[in-house]
Amino acid sequence: MAGASGFVGRWLCAALAAEGADVVGLGRSVQDGAHQDGVTWKRCDLFSLLDCERGLEGAEVVYYLVHSMMPSTRLTQATFEDMDLILADNMARAAAFVGAKRIIYLGGLIPEDQSKLSRHLSSRLEVEAALGATGVPVTPVRAGLVLGPNGSSFDMLRLLVERLPGMVLPPWTRTPTQPIWIGDVVQVMVRVVTQDVAVGQSLDVGAPEVLRYRALIEEMALALNKQPSMMDIPFGPKVLSKLWVSLVTGSSRDLVAPLIDSLDHPMVARNRAIQVALGVPGVPVRQAMARALADNEPELPKVPRGPRKEQANTVRSVQRLPLPEVHDADWAAQEYMAWMPRGLWPFLKVVQEDDGISSFRVAGLGIELLRLRYSKSRSSPTRALLYVVGGLLVVGKPTARGRLELRSALNECTLLAAIHDFEPSLPWYLYLSTQALAHLAVMRVFGWHLKDVATKRVPSAQPKELGAPD
């Protein structure tokens, strides 16, 4: 289970363990191999395909509960959409590799009109597509706001009502919504597997009633025995809503912003037939509020934390680039190596050495800036992997996991260029103002080059095989 240590994950682990399932929880900072409360924990960095393959070994059903809202390195040069996409692509590839029979994904409710979806909801749909791209059947369970103790969205709503004596309510508070009790979400996700239904199809879940966000705020106030004054206003820039929700609740703007953006859409279950057929009619909102605030949640699995890692100046950078038709990710990696000396002429030279080594050097001086090793065993036509193994611009450690990968995603129509766990040797603030900005600029120009190749405005560089002698 990816996301097992989170809000929904712990409830789901408890429910599956109660059914007698052999539950394995994946997490970046858990104690590897620990077995506690019916769950076996495996340390797993979901940005690493190798970690995902090892983590899913022996899995028949994969639960995917991951939403990448928060950065996982000191510097993250990526949108949450691109991070979500690369994580889902890893999980889909790993599930196919281990022979998993099914993926269950907890996503978001999608309105009927999909022409103007928020970035948040568009990403949810994209993750569904990415999870199904390798052929493993996917069942997306689509839910709105989940009501339960310690849920991030629920806690934001509670803190707003607790801390504000009065509120002005912008237009998004009149949008219809259909939240759901955490126990109902979990029971649906358990029963779609144990009763073997909804294979390869999505299902919407929600409470029996639909209400507007204003009414949801009123229900929270009633449950808290509060009487805040509320006034509807006909305007209200969302940027202000994001700011005051973040300030009042103490929640990160990285978490608040995408959620506020999605509130323009009616978050309503379009068809609850499968949910009801599974014997989960749904707890009414008022009852769910009372349960969540009573804080008498069932005994949930404790997450055994592993040894804390030393905080390093690590970087993750993910850029989405066009991938010309009839070409693959391995071609893109070769094209990148051949294009770089031209794109950065007359400053850079790339030397292809034996054993898959590409050496990036200052032209005319021979000073090696970066040294990359192409991993033939871990690469494929849809993914080229190069480890950062040396050079003046990187901190060299025997255990370093720094790597560059180019992979195709979404049925090979999108190219993701990603740097993971890169630790620069430059002083941190000097790196931010020089090398970090240069990398983004280079990737942007390379993207323009790929677009020109796709439209035949420029020829391909006809690159050599990676690692071939120059």
Image: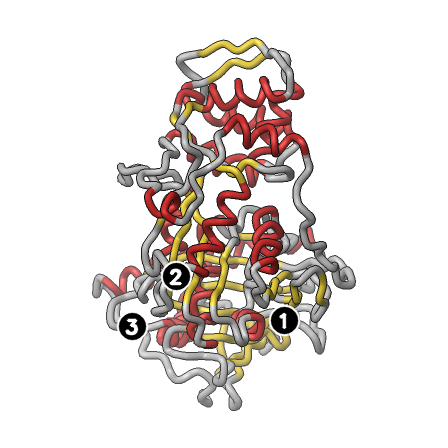
Q: Is residue 193 left or right of residue 426?
A: left
Structure colour scheme: secondary structure
Asked whether residue 213 is in view, the answer is yes
Q: Position of residue 142 (x, y in %)?
A: 41, 46
**Which amino acid type is marked by label 2?**
Asp
Q: How dense is the environment of label 2, judged by Cα within 10 Å: few (below 14), some, or many (20 and up)?
A: few
Marks 1 and 3 sit apart, C-alpha to C-alpha, by: 28 Å
Tag 2 or tag 3, which sits nearer the N-term? 2
Marks 3 and 2 sit apart, C-alpha to C-alpha, by: 39 Å
Q: Position of residue 439 (x, y in %)?
A: 52, 59
**Residue tagged 2:** 196
Rendered image quadrant of residue 232:
top left
Q: Is residue 294 left or right of residue 174?
A: right
Quarter of the image with the N terminus is bottom right
Tag 3 or tag 1, which sits nearer the N-term? 3
**Residues at discs 2 and 1 in contact (Cβ within 8 Å):** no
Asked if 177 appears above or below 125 in the picture, the reply is above
Q: How dense is the environment of label 1, judged by Cα within 10 Å: few (below 14), some, or many (20 and up)?
A: some
**Residue tagged 3:** 327
**Which amino acid type is marked by label 3?**
His
Asked if 149 appears above or below 323 in the picture, the reply is above
**Which amino acid type is marked by label 1?**
Arg
Q: Is residue 134 left or right of residue 324?
A: right
Asked if 159 appears above or below 186 in the picture, the reply is above
**Residue tagged 1:** 401
Q: Residue at x 48, y 38 (%)?
A: 258
Marks 2 and 1 sit apart, C-alpha to C-alpha, by: 40 Å
Q: Element under label 3?
A: loop
**Residues at discs 3 and 2 in contact (Cβ within 8 Å):** no
Q: Residue at x 61, y 63 (%)?
A: 26
Q: Residue at x 71, y 74 (%)?
A: 397
